């Protein structure tokens, strides 16, 4: 087992201080929530009839979490776009939310130009770059953050900025109404539980060594499942897939039978806040997975609120995938194949 108390050894694998950025998540959340509340933003929320979120990779995490937390309480039709083009229905009654940590994501910049042409209202969330310039030139309400609490500079480790920043923008402009008290409580909780969650993640990481993680989640943690999938891919350099309950109960159950020998490791993001029906489905899903001779474990949140659960799961998934990447002797900050792809694409 790798000695994670050996700071020098870890620093050799993690020269960009991915560990430091991961440990700063609670402070990111606190800073961002405070900064967004102080912004002077102008938006005609009464004119909004639908919302389109545009972002790639980690930059779309905020939309995933917000959509999952609000669920059936979302007052508008919502579309999440991770591509170059907006849907045909976008018009002046639409709100297009453009998110890019770097501010240089070509797909998001393409959507920005289309949103402008369609005279849609817009919001921007970015650290700078061309997207920040677009917001300034077109007087688009924006949260342009400094990213100082993400020393690694890796977008997926700036979740405090992209997730709570987006939620704060929509709440501040009156587009959605969030429970500020519960968010404040969840941020305070993040500081208190980080070390215990970190310890659990370190212990659990060994279970995924040499395995293919399969993530299950439901309801308000649905967005966290996709985030964890991406973190396994990028941070751990590990293939991973995710499925949502109840949908997986209508097809995946049969797919557990063959092949007989696999290296699958299932993980359920579980919560006391799940509805009664979903709780029963989770228990039965675990039963079926085990009857098919697969290993399945749970990360059980405290269940104090949907906001608590989402942040708690974020802390766990960040450390879990970081430690797994280090167990594989990988630099968790770099993405050589993504960089290779982008280089070839630009040629």
Image: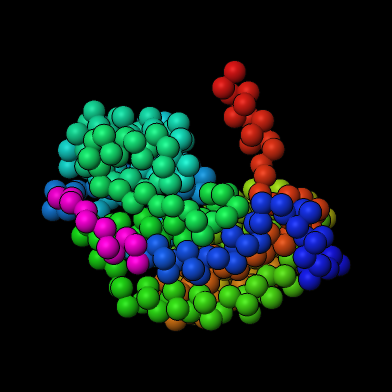
Expressed as whole percent of the image width and height from the top left, the position of residue 341 reads 63, 30
Q: In which quarter of the image is residue 300?
A: bottom right
The residue nearer to you, when weighing 272 against 106, is 106
Q: Can residue 181 be seen in this view?
A: yes
Q: Is residue 212 visible?
A: no
Furthest toward the top, the residue is 347
Q: Main secondary structure of the magenta part?
A: loop
Expressed as whole percent of the image width and height from the top left, the position of residue 335 reads 66, 42
Using residue 262 as the reference point, say whether residue 122 is left or right of it. left
Image quadrant where one finds the N terminus: bottom right
Using residue 9 as the reference point, say whether residue 109 is left or right of it. left
| Residue 301 versus residue 144 in the image, above or below | below
| Residue 292 versus residue 190 in the image, above or below | above
Is 43 inside the magenta-drawn segment? yes
Residue ID at (35%, 67%): 34
Expressed as whole percent of the image width and height from the top left, the position of residue 14 reads 72, 54
Expressed as whole percent of the image width and height from the top left, the position of residue 231 reads 61, 54
So how many labels did they put on this image?
0
Chosen colour scheme: rainbow
Is 35 inside the magenta-drawn segment? yes
The residue nearer to you, when weighing 304 against 13, is 13
Q: What stretch is highlighted in magenta?
A: 34-44
Residue ID at (40%, 62%): 32
Using residue 21 as the reference point, say whether residue 326 is left or right of it. right
Residue ID at (59%, 18%): 347
Residue ID at (46%, 35%): 104
| Residue 258 versus residue 86 in the image, above or below | below
């Amino acid at each position: 087992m790798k000695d994670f108390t050996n700071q020098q050894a870890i620093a050799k694998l993690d020269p960009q201080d991915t560990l430091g950025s991961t440990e700063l998540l609670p402070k990111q959340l606190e800073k961002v929530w405070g900064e967004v509340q102080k912004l002077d933003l102008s938006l005609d929320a009464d004119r909004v009839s639908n919302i389109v979120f545009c972002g790639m990779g980690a930059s779309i995490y905020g939309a995933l979490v917000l959509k999952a937390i609000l669920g059936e309480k979302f007052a508008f039709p919502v579309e999440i776009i991770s591509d170059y083009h907006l849907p045909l229905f976008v018009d002046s009654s639409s709100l297009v939310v453009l998110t890019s940590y770097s501010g240089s994501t070509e797909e998001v910049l393409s959507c920005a130009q289309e949103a402008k042409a369609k005279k849609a209202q817009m919001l921007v969330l970015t650290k700078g770059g061309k997207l920040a310039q677009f917001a300034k030139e077109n007087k688009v309400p924006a949260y342009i953050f400094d990213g100082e609490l993400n020393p690694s500079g890796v977008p997926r480790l700036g979740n405090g900025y992209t997730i709570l920043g987006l939620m704060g923008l929509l709440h501040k402009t009156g587009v959605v109404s969030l429970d500020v008290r519960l968010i404040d409580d969840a941020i305070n909780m993040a500081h208190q539980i980080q070390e215990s969650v970190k310890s659990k993640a370190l212990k659990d990481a060994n279970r995924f060594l040499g395995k293919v993680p399969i993530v299950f989640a439901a309801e308000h943690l649905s967005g966290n499942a996709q985030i964890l999938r991406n973190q396994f891919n990028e941070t751990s350099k590990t293939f991973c897939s995710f499925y949502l309950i109840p949908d997986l109960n209508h097809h995946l159950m049969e797919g557990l039978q063959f092949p007989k020998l696999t290296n699958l490791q299932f993980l359920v993001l579980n919560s006391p806040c799940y509805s009664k029906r979903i709780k029963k489905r989770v228990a039965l899903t675990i039963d079926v997975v085990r009857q098919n001779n697969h290993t399945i474990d749970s990360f059980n949140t405290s269940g104090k609120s949907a906001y608590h659960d989402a942040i708690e799961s974020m802390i766990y998934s960040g450390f879990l995938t970081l430690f797994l990447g280090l167990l594989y002797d990988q630099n968790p900050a770099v993405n050589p194949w993504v960089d290779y792809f982008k280089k070839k694409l630009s040629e």
